[in-house]
Image: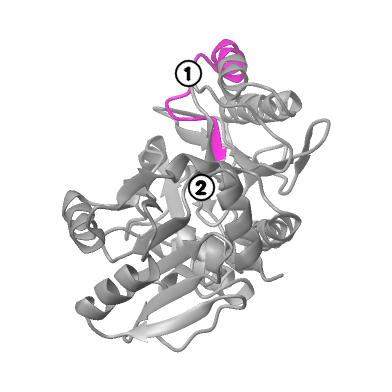
């Protein structure tokens, strides 16, 4: 049985609808189409996927996109909006309830869909889709592990890529080139290279300025067959100060501690709280962002991850980042690795250096 057929059957096992319609556009990019079809997101702009219980899936594809095939599904090229609407009505004839991924519909697109489908009831199935995506299959785990290996190997090249007088922008570009050469010709997210005061901001944008002495934070990931990795490494440009070494070690230890807490049925909120408490005691700083997030088709995938107040619990087969970070006048220190939740704990898919490395 093809990938899309297996996933479609699993989804319908948890639903009280006989059809699901997923769509993606330039404004609302629903990666669930990639999740079900196995196609790269760059091939899925302005497309509609129709899943029906015990029926062959149908992908309606814009004529602007290249010719593609999806094993186990029918692919039709459509060149006009009216064609999309006519096929939707025909394919959903007799269907009373249609599942949709509500977060990826604007008010306007939802109104247009209601107009096209008439009296059919639209049911939000985003929770069920998210729950499916949270626990990875053996195939997904293998692909994520490969993406992790690519990122890990590129991280080891950073000391040789760095040159005195190099700009943040240039180092980010060279890291990006390696990631594209070794993985897919796209990235999960733009490479972050942050030096000096710029490292105080988790989502710093690399600037056309020379990398300064002090701490250098680099955050990036690889993309491999529709699966992502995401790691963060910190270096010292020049000899690090004793205090910087101490802070790095404390953040690294917090990451290791968080990993030790990860096992099936553990609460995301409790892992966050206990790690945050340890970090506060050892550094004086508290977390200003989540402790980590799910990895998969998206770099911020399901589950939501280690967040304060989360009601979710870890399950075997989840893949997550663990990324404690502290930020202040010294810049920023964030150590991020990717882990797989196993039967009794978790397995590291990447491994950050235990000591602050000097460039």
Residue under the point 65% across and 44% down: 135
Magenta span of residues:
275-293
Label ID, residue 129? 2
Q: Position of residue 25 (x, y in %)?
A: 30, 65
Residue 53 appears in the figure:
yes
Residue under the point 39% across and 27% down: 329
- Marks 1/2 in contact by CB < 8 Å: the verdict is no
How crowded pointer 1 is (Cα within 10 Å; few <14, some 14-19, many 20+) is rated as few
Q: On the image, which quarter does residue 158 sit in? A: bottom right
Q: Which of 249 and 38 is in front in this view?
A: 38
Q: Earlier in the sequence, mark 1 or mark 2?
A: 2
Whether residue 263 is situated above or below residue 155 in the rendered picture:
above
Label ID, residue 309? 1
Residue 43 appears in the figure:
no
How crowded pointer 2 is (Cα within 10 Å; few <14, some 14-19, many 20+) is rated as many
Residue under the point 57% across and 21% down: 272
């Amino acid at each position: 049985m093809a990938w899309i057929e297996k996933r479609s059957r699993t989804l319908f096992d948890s639903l009280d609808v006989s059809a699901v319609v997923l769509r993606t556009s330039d404004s609302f990019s629903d990666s669930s189409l990639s999740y079900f079809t196995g196609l790269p997101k760059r091939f899925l702009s302005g497309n509609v996927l129709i899943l029906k219980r015990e029926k062959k899936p149908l992908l309606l594809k814009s004529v602007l996109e290249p010719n593609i095939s999806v094993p186990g599904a029918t692919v039709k090229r459509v060149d006009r909006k009216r064609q999309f609407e006519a096929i939707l009505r025909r394919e959903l004839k007799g269907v009373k309830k249609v599942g949709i991924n509500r977060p990826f519909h604007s008010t306007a697109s939802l109104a247009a869909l209601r107009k096209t489908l008439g009296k059919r009831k639209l049911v939000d199935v985003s929770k069920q889709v998210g729950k499916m995506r949270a626990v990875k299959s053996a195939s997904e785990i293998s692909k994520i592990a490969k993406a992790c290996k690519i990122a890990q190997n590129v991280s080891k090249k950073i000391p040789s890529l760095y040159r005195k007088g190099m700009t943040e922008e240039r180092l980010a570009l060279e890291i990006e080139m390696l990631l594209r050469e070794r993985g897919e010709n796209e990235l999960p997210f733009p490479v972050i290279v942050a030096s000096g005061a710029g490292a105080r901001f988790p989502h710093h944008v690399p600037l056309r300025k020379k990398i300064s002495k002090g701490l250098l934070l680099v955050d990036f990931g690889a993309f491999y067959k529709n699966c992502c990795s995401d790691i963060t490494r910190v270096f010292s440009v020049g000899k690090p100060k004793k205090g910087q070494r101490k802070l790095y070690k404390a953040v690294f230890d917090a990451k290791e501690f968080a990993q030790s807490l990860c096992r099936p049925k553990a609460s995301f909120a409790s892992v966050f709280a206990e790690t945050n408490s340890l970090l506060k005691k050892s550094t004086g700083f508290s977390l200003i962002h989540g402790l980590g997030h799910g990895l998969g088709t998206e770099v911020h995938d399901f589950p939501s991850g280690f967040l304060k107040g989360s009601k979710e619990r870890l399950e075997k087969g989840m893949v997550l980042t663990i990324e404690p970070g502290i930020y202040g006048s010294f810049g920023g220190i964030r150590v991020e690795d990717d882990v797989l939740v196993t039967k009794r704990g978790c397995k590291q898919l990447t491994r950050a250096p235990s000591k602050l490395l000097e460039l």
